[in-house]
Amino acid sequence: MTTYTKTAETRTFEADVSRLLHMMVHSVYSDRDVFLRELISNAADACEKLRFEAVSRPELLGDDPKPRITIAADPDNKELVVEDNGIGMSRDEMAEALGTIARSGTRAFMERVEAGKAAEDTQLIGQFGVGFYSAFMVADRVDVISRQAGSDEAFRWSSDGKGTYEIGPVPLEAAPKRGTRVVLHLMEDATSYATPYRLEGLAKSQSGHVPVPITLVEKPGAEPRDIADGTALWVRQKSEIKPEEYIDFYRSVAGQYDEPASTIHFRAEGRQEYSVLAFVPGSRPFGLFDQDRKGRMKLYVRRVFITDDADLLPRYLRFVRGLVDSADLPLNVSREMIQESPLLAAIRKGVTNRVLGDLAKTAENDAEAYAKIWENFGVVLKEGLYENYERREQLLKLARFRSTASGEGWRSLADYVGAMKEGQKAIFFMAGDDRARLEASPQLEGFRARGIEVLLLTDPVDSFWVTMAPEFDGKPFKSVTQGAAELADIPLPDDAAKPDAETSSDIAAFLAFVKTTLGKEVSDVKASDRLTESAVCLVAPEHGPDRQFERLLNAAGRLDKAAKPILEINPRHERVAALAKLGDDDKAFKEDAAHLLYDEARVLDGDKPADAKAFSARLARLIDRGLAKG
Ligand code: ADP
């Protein structure tokens, strides 16, 4: 941080701010209205921060205890002011807050916008911590004059958004008594934002439910007029709240621009008293997969905002937006201590119950709406399957899957279990990163022939939870690329080709030969009951990771020692039968064939041949042999 000086100085924006401003000024965002919501939201935050500080330092409020946001229009001078009597900023805070970008995801955001994905990202400005800079969409100069609560100095920040800003002291008469005044000098094509009716409409529709009252001054010298009363929406009766009011509130609390997929509003009474207003967003909020994977539920205590960092929901519900307002938590307690409070643990449990309950209800009553929720947040919810043992059964009920029977729809585990075949004991799955490749896998053939459904798991998180040995309805999960397929007990349909009497002595000898030839490449060579059309496939040994999990561990550098796969050979396959009949003649040819069968299985699994050079030599010999015969 730079040292304090009494005079005004000019400073250069951090490079990323300049980039961002450039984007703002050149209006990649089609919806410029959002700037007002961003400024009002900052003003409300500032009032709430002060309310919190004043719990331990009531003198900060002085003779002006009521929080207030004032919007003042000056149509003649093409000016618009958004002012609050909140916490205010010191000089250093101003330079820090309005000259740099704190949030880590911002660079990624800008790259996406610059790559031409602007349209979808208009939705995201607010969440990127770039809210204030959106003022430059409508203004060619912005002044911020601020006096921190309890301070006897005031400062002015001013910029045209073109690379530098000025910062310096101003006389107290030129500043708000407390808080921050943001003055927008509107661009020629944005002067309508100084029109009172326009401002009133925007403020009411975008920010009508911020918990701070808003007044409007229609022109210089006019009396302030209340346009929003700052009543917290969540303390009102559910029956009195209109759907639009919920939507507006959702947009301001979540920084989203869509409509919520689900609204959860309730008051818990009894041993714990608290209100909850939470939303399942209609689309993925920004930052869902950030490093810290934190939720953004806000904690209030008797309408005083405390923190949005209180872990009010488990991580696998971090997509939920909204707030909890507790009547029991002490107000004058540090944020850190709140985190440890047993009261908070009880609230967390209660809110988690309600959110999961709401999801279950949607799943039951409106499959289509639930499918959308699942498509957006299923991969997050599935993290709970391995992070939260106690909730696993509940989450398994909520989980939806693609499968060999699902088409483009979704299957629940109850659907799956209901369709299990006679003699089938397990819930079969195959994990991989691409559904099309999974569906073409030889490992599925025997299941398909028997009409057995196989879940197709394509999210990386799937490989993790399935290894935690979950059960559903008493049925274990079993990978089709691991261990024995256990298909013998499940009858083939009458019209399917029945396998011949298992492994003749020729076949047994051939399997042994292949095993000797491949040596250390594989841990075993076995006759397969999971193949019907293909000649070969690879599976993982019964214990340890399945094929896909092994790949993930390997990619993450967490696999100490790769387990050798088992090569399964289809004894009913014509080519295999013919090879088995060759006897001891032509050993070199049979050895080539053994290696090529192994490489074929590897390629079908999405891998490379074991040894590219040896592979080409063998293939060449095979082609030559074919040519010589022809
Ligand atoms: P965000 O609000 O998401 O953090 P902004 O770009 O909107 O991002 O604001 C950056 C920071 O500037 C805020 O976090 C806050 O510290 C400060 N700030 C902006 N407006 C005000 C205000 N009216 N009063 C006090 N501080 C403010």
Image (cartoon, rainbow, N blue to C red):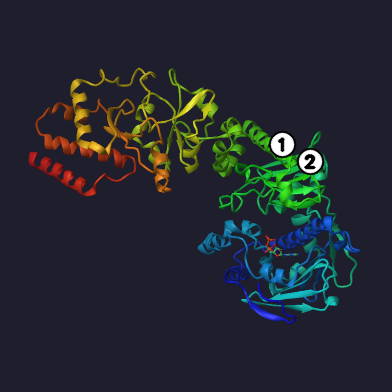
Image quarter for ligand 1 equals: bottom right
Q: For the residue marked with disc 2, what is the amino acid? A: Tyr
Q: Are marks 2 and 1 in contact (CB under 8 Å)?
A: yes
Q: Is residue 269 above or below residue 174?
A: above
| Residue pictured at 41% horizontal, 36% vertical | 545
Left or right placement of residue 183 versus residue 453 in this view: right
Tell which of 10 and 399 is nearer to you.
10
Q: For the residue marked with disc 1, what is the amino acid? A: Gly
Place residue 512 in its image quadrant: top left
State the image coordinates of residue 340 (x, y, percent, origin top left).
Answer: 71, 45
Location of mark 2 (residue): 274
Left or right placement of residue 570 versus residue 397 in this view: left
What SS does tag 1 mark? Answer: helix
Dot 2: few (<14), some (14–19), or many (≥20) neighbours within 10 Å?
Answer: many
Tell which of 534 and 84 is nearer to you.
84
Location of mark 1 (residue): 350
What SS does tag 2 mark? Answer: strand
Q: Is residue 605 visible?
A: yes
Left or right placement of residue 374 versus residue 180 in this view: left
Q: In which quadrant of the rendered image does the C terminus lie?
A: top left
State the image coordinates of residue 496 (x, y, percent, origin top left).
Answer: 33, 21
| Residue pictured at 51% horizontal, 62% vertical | 115
State the image coordinates of residue 623 (x, y, percent, origin top left).
Answer: 14, 43
State the image coordinates of residue 347 (x, y, percent, origin top left).
Answer: 73, 39
